[in-house]
Amino acid sequence: MGLKKGDEYLKSIKSLRLKAHVLGEKPGDLPEHGLVEPSQKAVAFTYDAAQDKETRDLFCVESSLGKYVVNRFTHLHQSADDLVNKVKMQRYCGVQTGCCFQRCVGLDAANSIFSTTYECDQKHGTNYHERFNDYWGWIQQEDLVVDGAMTDPKGDRSKRPVEQPDPDLFLRIKERRSGGIIISGAKLHQTGMLNSHEILVMPTLTMRPGEESWAVCCAVPTNSKGIHYIYGRQASDTRKLETYKLDVGNPVYGGQEVMTVFDDVFVPAERVFLDGEVDFSGLLVERFASYHRQSYGGCKAGVGDVLIGATALIAQMNGVDKASHITDKLVEMIHLNETIYSCGIACSATGEQTAAGNFQVNMLMANVCKLNVTRFPYELARLATDVAGGLLGTMPSAADLEDPLAGKYIRKYLAANPEYATVDRMKVLRLIENLVAGAGAVGYLIESMHGAGPPTAQRIMIRRQAKLGEKIDKVKAFLGIK
Ligand code: SF4
């Protein structure tokens, strides 16, 4: 099986016949649901880009598991250059789609599991690494989308998994049977889940002795028996169901989130990659988090490009692009966005080889990258709102534009720079609204804050990785302090 095209991917997802609870309904044909379709198109883009002669060199790479070419979204990084190319690819996808294209989570999970299972086998004599390589070779050759599922509901935050009144608040192994395990629990905030063929389940935090049942990593198909999906709401999401695409803001692509419930799902032994080894749960979480914090340096910078472009364009449309305070604000936006990207590149270029042979990002810089991402998109959004003006929050709907009387007045009174049609000005304003306050803000702002862990998680990692003691010793040495 070679690399799939976007429409082949869409067909393959449709054939899974996934069902989800969406706004109180259970639709029969999920891929064609108006809410789901834009996010599926964003994933399909990652397939088409691997076929496009302009971009295929960036998207296609030789597998390390066999003699075949894979989409970089399934690649096990073999060098620091691979890590850098991953971020470049993500920025490209971000600027082309203006939203989350979802496929990076599985890639980050795979690279973390690959190295962690190797080290776990060395210590415990398990055979998870070989199992994982067999599994991932299949994923690469079939060119599948894999969702990495980490975030548990976590219940009472003051309690450990073992202390929760309901043990399922952290996903766990409920039963060990000959031939496999039964898992029970849920994973929240799953962006790419409904557009994936497979799920890689991982623990959500470092488990301790006594918490073996929660130290689980495994793979299951998204259409497994016992899995239930409940769709999350986004601000202005139902605009995607309306006739007029202008009000959606991003007329082609979009994001979505689902809660995924695992109600006694059977996992065969050959798909289990961690089963009670609590001492490797934390390593897996840290590695995954660092890879995904690196990822944000690419994708959020790409979406930032869209916001900067839209802001510069609306300034032209409003006739204020020559004003010095507008130029200053645009330069500030570019500075913030390129800082995000620079950190993504820096943590990739200084990445190092793991014992298993693949490459891991520089964890300190990856966490600095993500900490910047929790702040800078908000500042970019503030500046875009400032430049765009108050119409961003008060503009009439596309339906009113179609009305003979209202439409005449809208065209007359929302006209600005005569070089641009009023409707085009409305399109740009809706796109900015989408990113700073509409459905797109889920991916660009809320996800920037909480995706791959909230700011506190990065601060903890920065403190851990910073080698503060070494810095103190250096100062003592040159000051002659004992
Ligand atoms: Fe990829 Fe960014 Fe979406 Fe994460 S948030 S899956 S890095 S596009």
Image (spheres, rainbow, N blue to C red):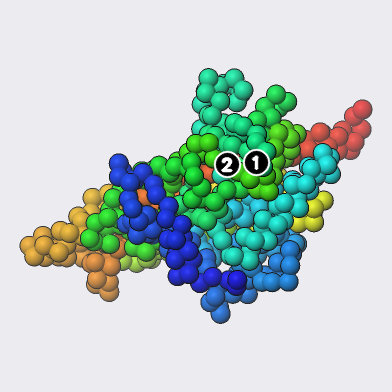
Q: Position of residue 349 (x, y in %)?
A: 72, 59
Q: Which residue is mark 2?
A: 266
**Does residue 439 appear in this view?**
yes
- Which of disc 1 and disc 2 is earlier in sequence? 1
Q: Residue furthest front?
A: 178
The answer to whether 58 is drawn above or below residue 430 in the figure is below
User: Which numbered dot is residue 70?
Assistant: none
Amino acid carrying mark 1 in the image: Gly
For this rendering, which residue is in front, 144 or 245? Answer: 144
Q: Residue at x 45, y 65 (%)?
A: 10
Residues under numbered marks 2 and 1 in contact, where contact means CB atoms less than 8 Å apart: yes
In this picture, residue 333 sits left or right of residue 148 = left
For this rendering, which residue is in front, 198 or 245? Answer: 198
User: Which numbered dot is residue 180?
Assistant: 1
Question: Callout 2: 10 Å neighbours few (<14), some, many (20+)?
Answer: many
Q: Position of residue 40 (x, y in %)?
A: 43, 60
**Does residue 456 appear in this view?**
no
Question: Callout 1: 10 Å neighbours few (<14), some, many (20+)?
Answer: some
Q: Does mark 2 have its CB less than 8 Å from ligand 1?
A: no
Location of the N terminus by quadrant is bottom right
The answer to whether 68 is drawn above or below residue 470 in the figure is below
The answer to whether 167 is drawn above or below residue 125 in the figure is above
Amino acid carrying mark 2 in the image: Phe
Q: Secondary structure at mark 1?
A: strand
* Spatial separation of the CA atoms under disc 2 and disc 1: 7 Å
